Structure formats: C-alpha cells, structure tokens
Image (cartoon, grey):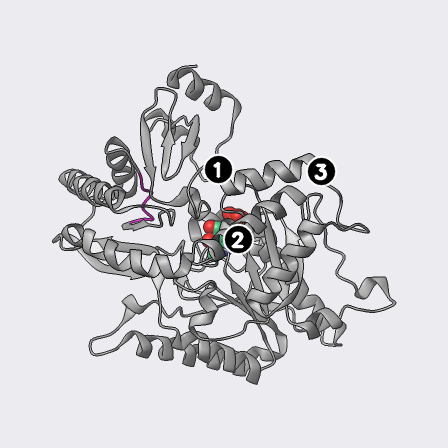
Amino acid sequence: MTNQELVQRSLAAIWHPCTQMKRHESFPLIPITRGDGVWLYDCEDRRYLDAVSSWWVNLFGHNEPRIKAAITRQMDCLEHVMLAGFTHEPAVQLSEQLAALTGLGHAFYGSDGASATEIALKMSAHYWRNCGLPQKNRFVYLENSYHGETLGALSVTDVPVFRSAYAPLVRDNFRVMNPDSRQALPGESAKDVAERAAQQLEVLLTAHHNEIAALILEPLVQGAAGMAMYDAHYLRRARSLCDKFCVHLIADEIAVGFGRTGSMFACEQGPIQPDMICLSKGITGGHLPLAAVLCRDDIYQAFYDDDAARGFLHSHSYTGNPLACAAALATLQIFADDDVLRQNAEKACRFDKLFEPLAGHAAIRHWRRTGMIWAFDVTDAPPDFAQRYFAAALAQGLLVRPIGTTVYFMPPYIIQNEEVEQLAAGALTALEQSLEAR
Ligand SMILES: Cc1ncc(COP(=O)(O)O)c(C=O)c1O
C-alpha cells in the first residue's frame, strides 16, 4: 500500500485522537508501517526519529526484542483471564515488583493513564466514606495540571482546550497555584516559587480540608503544561500539609515514572512517599496498554470487610491482562540488566553538550532539563507555531510535537549520540523555519 492510500483510508475510517480532523486538509497524516529503535518508518521507508517516545511511552524504543520475546512467550500460555475471582503469575510477579519499588501495595490495574486517575480518585473518596467521612469527596489539583480526559480525570485537569466543552459534565474541584519555576519573580529561586505555591496550598487546606479527599499532582514535571519543571521542595511541603490536614497525596507518575526524571519514580527525589501512585505509559515500554494504582496498606484495609459495598468494586474487562503484565515485567528486567538509571544519568550530561548549539539560540527562553526530558520556550512565536514547528520537524525526519510555544524532547532512553546530533541539528533548522513565518 502507498502512503497516500493508507492516509485516505484512515481519514475515511478513523476518528483520530486529540485532533481537529479538518486540520488534515492542510497537515497530512503520517502513515507508519513499522518501528525500530528510535525510528518510525512510513510505507515508502521514509523514517522519523521518535523524539517524544510516541506520547512518552516507548522507553526503550520500538520493537524492543526482549519485551517482544516476553509477550510472545506469554502468548503461548495465557493471553487473558479476568482478574475478578482469578489470578495469574505475571500479575502477581508484577504487583510484587511494583510494591518493592514504590513501597506501596495491592496494585489495582487499569488500562490507560486516565483509568489510573479514575481509580485513584474513586479509591480516595471511597476510603473517606468507609471511614465515616463521606463529606471528604473533593480534590485539589495544580494549575495547568493534566491527569487524563475521562470525566473524573478532567475534573482535576486544568487545560481549557480539553475541558471547556465538557464543563457542565465535570465536577468542580479546587485548583491551586502550581510551583512551575518559570514563575520566579526577580530574585526568587525555584525553591522560593515552590514555597510560595505551598503556602497557597496551605491556605486552601486550612479552609477546606473537611471536604477534601486528596491532592493530586504530577511530581517534578507537569508534562502537558509544557514540561513545567519544579523544585522538589514542593513535594516535601505538599506531603507534610497532606499529613497535617488528613488529605491523601496522589502522585500521578503516569508520565514521569519509570526513570524519566532520573530516579525510578519522581517522588524519590523529594524524597516523599505518596499515599497512592498512578502508573501507566512507560510501564510496558510502550508495547501494550496497562495502568496500575498502588496504595498504602491502611487504605486497602479500610475496604476489607464483610460488606460488599465497602469493597472497591471498580473494574475493567482487561484489568491485569497477562500479556501487558509480561511486557511490564520485561521492562523492569531491562532496568535491572542494563543499569538504565545510571546509564541515563551519564547520557543526559553528554546530550546536554550536544544540544548546546540549539540551546544557545536567541529565540529560546527557559532551556531546561529534568532527567531525560529537555524543553525550551520560544519567544515571539507566530500563533500557529506548534503546527508549523511540527511540520518543519517532520521535514527534517523528526517527530517533535510542541505544546503551544514549548518544544520538548522525551526520547527513548536507547537514543545514541549520533541520533541526538541529528535531533539537535534538525530541531534548530525547524526552529528557524518556523520563526521565518512570523
Ligand atoms: C501525567 C498524566 N496523567 C495522565 C495521563 C493520561 O494518560 P492516558 O492518555 O493514557 O489516558 C497523561 C497522558 O499524557 C499524563 O501525562
């Protein structure tokens, strides 16, 4: 099949996500037939460097042989069984390993990130209900947060373009200042901004803690906000305020978990222990959909009862799918076998140097990095900068999708020097071309 045919059939048959479909009249869909390492290939073998790990999921690139082999092995014995009333070894092993890594337990499985957010929000409110405090059923979220787009998740997501059309369907929760260090006033450090945001959180919790079940946040980096990075001081302050006011702290590590910020989980850099952690995206190295929520033992115990209605009756058909669990186990094995966190720390410093020619461009502000996430903001960008940049980057053989005027790279961890050099050079050309349009 040619590129052209595949695109035409796709436009006729698929409603693509996160897309105003009419845009494809001027910005063509990119047909992809295969992936290998950091590269995606179209029908005519043109290739694109996947600098965003396909929505931040492909930690070790495409077609990772060890993950593929684990899925194939699992396929030979059990592809699926419902997890209500049944169990299987891949889910048990994965739950044990995630518990050892997070210090939390009783993994509850979902499919995508938003399903993990829903699980955590429901679990928190239901916990307080089981404790005789049903009025604690609202949530606190940070400005510019993103926790997914199902209705519950949207109620703690602060991105108007995703939320506004559904406002009448979405419950009102409490939004507080985020600790994004770009908000520093003259003379303020990133830690000062974090402290200022924490003080606002304290004011809110003082007034409303009786009706609040949980605070949900993306630790260290708010991804969809445009890779807003912040000081770990905020995590420590949020933890102690949640303790003081009897409010759960839900860490949404869907985007930042599994090494992306430099530690296995971003909360470790507080260090803090959340009451619940939401995991997805990189959990299977991008090979199958899976999400998990782990919680403190006393949360689990509050549901353990003779009364079915006090149990957590949430479910999804594919909960704990054995193939996805096998992919996740293989992903964790790669972290151990390849000493991924140490390797990433070394690589990131090397890559900083390779990015220098780009980082020094006069139109760039707030060049920043946390772990394996690089981002910068573009000044005086034209209104349609994101689309222009996306198209210009594609022409350079790069998959880079800016968020507004923020360009970011979240490459697969296996990326090599030479590929980063291509990325840096192509990203610079794309920047200049997108700015010429002003
Ligand atoms: C921090 C965070 N939470 C939740 C989600 C939702 O995940 P999904 O798109 O798999 O529903 C995302 C997705 O980008 C995310 O970045």
Query: Label 1 to label 3, Cα distance in Å?
Result: 33 Å
Give the residue pinned by disc 3: 77
Rendered view: 266 above or below 258: below
The residue pinned by badge 2 equals 333
Residue situated in front as seen by the camera: 238 or 329: 329
Q: Residue at the spot x=47%, y=81% of the render?
A: 203
Real-space CA distance between mark 3 and mark 2, rounded to the nearest whole angstrom: 20 Å
| Residue linked to disc 1 | 17
Q: Amino acid at mark 1?
A: Pro
Q: Is residue 169 left or right of residue 192?
A: right
**In the depicted structure, whether residue 222 falls above or below residue 298:** above
Q: Residues within 10 Å of mark 1 (few under 14, many from 20)?
A: few
| Badge 1 residue CB within 8 Å of ligand 1 | no
Q: x and y percent of residue 54 in the render?
A: 42, 41
Which badge, 1 or 3, comes first in the chain's sequence? Answer: 1
Position above or below: 90 against 249: above
Dot 3 and dot 2 residues touching (CB under 8 Å) = no
What is the three-letter code of the residue carrying label 2? Gln
Q: Magenta includes 186?
A: no
Q: Nearer the viewer, mark 1 or mark 3?
A: 3
